[in-house]
Image (cartoon, rainbow, N blue to C red):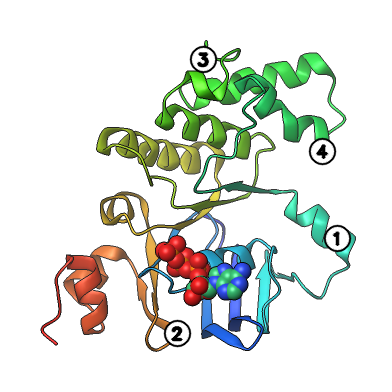
Amino acid sequence: MSPPESAPAISAEDLVLAFGSFVVMEDLTFDVESGEIFAIMGGSGSGKSTLLKHLFGQMHPSAGTIRIGGRDLWAMSADERAAMLREVGILYQADALWSTMTLAENVALPLEEHTALAAPDIDRIVSLKLALVGLRGFEDFRPHEISGGMRKRAALARAVALDPDLLFFDEPTSGLDPISARRLDDLILQLRDSLDTTVVVVSHDLESIFTIADRALYLDIDTKTMTALGPPEDLRSNPPNERVYQFLTRSLDNE
Ligand SMILES: Nc1ncnc2c1ncn2[C@@H]1O[C@H](COP(=O)(O)OP(=O)(O)OP(=O)(O)O)[C@@H](O)[C@H]1O
């Protein structure tokens, strides 16, 4: 963990997320601390992916402020913002690997695009990153030649190619069998520890949330705002409202 005087990794203040006049969420205020794994939870359509896109600068909030490392994302120049966002790793729900390229070529892409490293150095980093996610020896395979779990791990190797300080995951375990999902969770924990990365993850996989998240935020689709924030175990043992209780215990309401 960073010293307490340092700025949070991400700071969101009075955020309003909207598509035109359609408000998805409002009054969102929270910090993501450096080095933590922070989960965004909520029912389908509550705005989890939309919030994530705001946190990595792909969408502009309708109101409010997002700071990364203390710097206001939308008060800086477009060039500064682009440079800052190059430091961020993103793993989408679909792994988004290029199907015509080998795993090594996929992982090399961000290094070729954003660094001036020579080819042998890139090859060395690619091998290291693939080994980090348990894919040593699969450098020359193409995405369709490996399993879904392995594709996710290859996409993760690409997301960490530039050693990002911040990693964003949208439903990383979706579509995976329980064992592959658990393996990916362990890998996320291991990467956070070895790379000292801050991780923000959107998930409705409760097992995964309880395994990896230090803290979780709950987006309530009915009130259009966050109604819970804290360690998942605390929220389950002491739920702040009925909806959060139902979500975390997978129980049905009696209405
Ligand atoms: N490009 C868009 N234009 C207009 N509305 C959108 C757009 N993208 C999402 N929405 C709407 O915003 C709301 C939040 O969507 P979002 O995908 O963020 O929810 P989610 O919590 O991630 O859902 P899920 O768990 O089903 O993936 C939904 O009502 C959705 O229909």
Q: Residues within 10 Å of mark 4 (few under 14, many from 20)?
A: few
- In terms of secondary structure, where does tag 2 sit? strand
Q: Earlier in the sequence, mark 4 or mark 2?
A: 4
Residue 142 image-quadrant placement: top right
Q: Earlier in the sequence, mark 2 or mark 1?
A: 1
Q: Which residue is mark 3?
A: 136
Residue 216 image-quadrant placement: bottom left
Q: Going 69% across and 63% down the picture, which residue do you hit? A: 58
Q: Which mark is residue 23?
A: none
How far is disc 4 from disc 2 in space, using C-alphas? Answer: 37 Å
Name the amino acid, label 2: Thr
**Where residue 32 sits: x, y (%)?**
52, 66
How far is disc 2 from disc 3 in space, using C-alphas? Answer: 44 Å
* Closer to the camera in the image, 34 or 21: 21
How far is disc 1 from disc 4 in space, using C-alphas? Answer: 14 Å
Count of marks, rendered view: 4
Residue 11 shows in the view: no
Q: Which mark is residue 225?
A: 2
- In terms of secondary structure, where does tag 4 sit? helix
Q: Nearer the viewer, mark 2 or mark 3?
A: 2
* Closer to the camera in the image, 88 or 98: 98
Marks 3 and 1 in Cβ contact (< 8 Å): no
**Where residue 112 sits: x, y (%)?**
80, 30
Q: Which residue is mark 1?
A: 80
Q: Which residue is mark 4?
A: 114
Q: Nearer the viewer, mark 2 or mark 1?
A: 2
- In terms of secondary structure, where does tag 3 sit? loop
Q: Earlier in the sequence, mark 2 or mark 3?
A: 3
Q: Earlier in the sequence, mark 4 or mark 3?
A: 4
